[in-house]
Amino acid sequence: MSVNKFFIEKLLYPAMEWKKGNRIRVYLQEMEQTQYAAPEVLRALRAARLKTLLHACAAGVPAYQSLGISDAAIERDPWAVLRTIPILKKSAFQAQPQRYLNTRYDRSRLIANVTGGSTGEPVRFFMDRYTVEHYEAARWRGLSWWDITPGSRSVMIWGNPIELSQDKQRAARWKDRFLKNRMILSAYDLTEQDVARYIRFLNRYQPEYLYGYASALSTFADLLAPFADALRLRHLKAVVSTSETLYDHQRQRLQDVFGSPVLNEYGARDAGILGYECPCGHLHLSAENCILEVVDPVTFEPVPPGQSGLVVTTDLNNLAMPRLRYLLGDTATLSPETGCPCGVTLPVIRSLDGREDAIFQLPDGKLVHGNFVNQLSRKYDSFRQFQLVQTSIDRAELRLVLCEQSRPEEIDAFRQDVAGFLPGVEVRAVVVPRIEPGKSGKFRYSIRQFDLHA
């Protein structure tokens, strides 16, 4: 065990528990037990937490007090009460966030947070330590399936905290290096000129895992691929992809370059760690912390397991600023299967299908998920970057960044392939010098710029 790992796990965490009351390890131990619980035991645990949450909402959260939820109804059937709660869109929450603050909660215990704003305006909200520590426990529980612990050395392909002053950025890097045992490579300026430096750094630092957005990790792997034989990553246990859809070809590329398993972490700043992929390839829901529903994109009615729809979450631990049935903006499919060879009994998310605004709508009302453009692109070698944007019900723009050895005939061939999936929509190909990532650093392959119509 390295000196820094020993310091974090044997000295720092116990000190935080003694001085600040940090309970991450306590919650982690609890979750390591409940991950093997029988379905009825897990359901009872979730029902108890849901009752506590609903009682708190009925007693002190203006947005939910107005619904007239009775304590008797909550005690009788909390699941039935939850189903009566209207789905909460981000825009509605952003319009009146103060109505979701618990008036009976100690405001001095609130922790402010904000999303990256990858789909528009950032969402500002509050949590407390109890909530945050359950998020962290869920992350370390998932990583523990891969023999990764809180002191494990990591490299993050991530955005720099550019909003901070130079002094605060230095302080953040010091904290990352010595208190979290991680180093950050900026996802904003990955360049071919620095490949030799990246390889020297990785071989010297010897991380136990890499962590980052799927697109940033994939870009990093593409840069290193021609020189992958020079990598000597003796202790690398996993590459952890988060916050974006991880496509099969990206997973394969990462496995080929880094020579380690690639796994999905499913989480969101405003929802916590929702799921983790186990060594058997199943994405297990953090069921102790949340209730996840999948609903129809137009009607918002629940869809059966095996059918794709919008993700709706209810955080069971955030009593400070509850958001019941919160429309996260993702699309996913729940699995109808139960059980897993790994022994974990937590529910399984069959697939993460992308963002809600990557669902395209045809003039006849049919919905088509934009993931198809990523699959089509693999036929062609002429494009360094691409992005399909549906600007209206009958128009879309295919933005292309060409490679040096591009072939002009592939531009129209790609356009025609895309148009074949979008009958009734005029698809126009546009060559651009660069496609910028969003404010959060995430890259979007497919975007719809208007609301879905019934």
Image: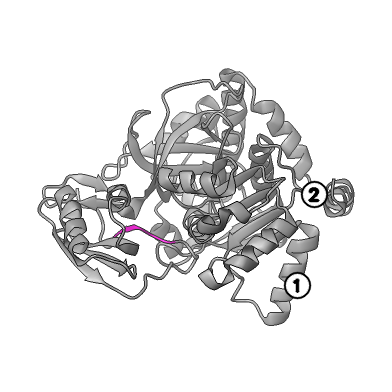
Mark 1 vs mark 2: which is more N-terminal?
A: 2
Residue closest to the eye, 264 or 223: 223
Against 13, residue 163 (above or below) is: below
Label 1 crowd (10 A; few <14 / some 14-19 / many >=20)? few
Residue drawn at x 56%, y 58% is 227
Instruction: Describe the element under mark 1 as helix, strand or loop.
Output: helix
- Residue 51 highlighted magenta (yes or no): no
Q: Which mark is residue 171?
A: 1
Q: Main secondary structure of the magenta part?
A: loop
Residue closest to the eye, 277 or 203: 203
Residue drawn at x 31%, y 47% is 375
- 151 lies left or right of 265: right
State the extent of the magenta-drawn residues as a range: 443-447
- Residue 444 highlighted magenta (yes or no): yes
Residue drawn at x 69%, y 63% is 201
Residue closest to the eye, 158 or 355: 158
Residue closest to the eye, 333 or 147: 147
Residue 327 in the image, given as x and y percentages of width and height? 41, 49
- The residue type indicated by label 2 comes to Asn
